[in-house]
Image (tube, rainbow, N blue to C red):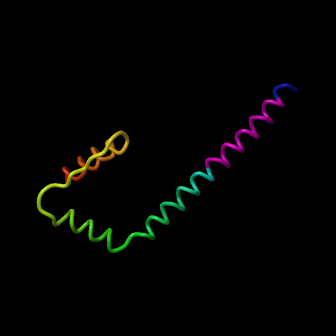
């Protein structure tokens, strides 16, 4: 009988966890779609500037943005 109660609670917790995870993924997917739809001339201009510009592209940041900057710099250096 105790095991049956635990299984019921676990099922409830599992359902709640799945609902929460799915909602988070749906929200993130909506944000990615909104970002994709907002791309325009400014994005094309930035890509053109990076690909056809002279000199170097400087990537910098502190903390997490610094980590992303290092990864971006490595990507740009390898292409």
Q: Residue furthest bottom?
A: 41
Q: Residue furthest right?
A: 1
**Residue 68 point in image, percent of width and height:** 33, 46
Please name the residue shown 62% across and 51% down the image: 22
Which quadrant does the C terminus fall into? Answer: bottom left
In magenta, the rendered stretch is: 4-21
Q: Which one is nearer the viewer's eye here, 53 or 19?
A: 53
The answer to whether 55 is drawn above or below residue 9 in the figure is: below
User: What secondary structure characterizes most of the magenta part?
Assistant: helix
Q: Which one is nearer the viewer's eye here, 79 or 31?
A: 31
Q: Residue furthest front?
A: 62
Q: Quarter-wise, where is residue 41 in the image?
A: bottom left
Residue 11 on the magenta segment: yes
**Residue 39 point in image, percent of width and height:** 39, 69
The answer to whether 48 is drawn above or below residue 28 in the figure is: below
**Residue 32 point in image, percent of width and height:** 48, 61
**Residue 45 point in image, percent of width and height:** 27, 70
Please name the residue shown 26% across and 66% down the image: 47
Q: Is residue 71 left or right of residue 58?
A: right
Which quadrant does the N terminus fall into? Answer: top right
Please name the residue shown 81% across and 27% down the image: 3
Q: Quarter-wise, where is residue 63 in the image?
A: top left
Q: Which one is nearer the viewer's eye here, 55 or 75?
A: 55
Residue 49 on the magenta segment: no
Q: Residue furthest left?
A: 54
Q: Is residue 26 left or right of residue 11?
A: left
């Amino acid at each position: 009988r105790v095991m049956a109660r635990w299984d019921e609670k676990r099922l409830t917790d599992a359902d709640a966890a799945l609902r929460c995870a799915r909602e988070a993924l749906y929200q993130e997917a909506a944000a990615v779609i909104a970002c994709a739809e907002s791309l325009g001339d400014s994005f094309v201009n930035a890509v053109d500037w990076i690909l056809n510009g002279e000199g170097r592209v400087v990537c910098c940041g502190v903390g997490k943005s610094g980590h992303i900057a290092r990864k971006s710099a490595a990507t740009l250096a390898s292409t």
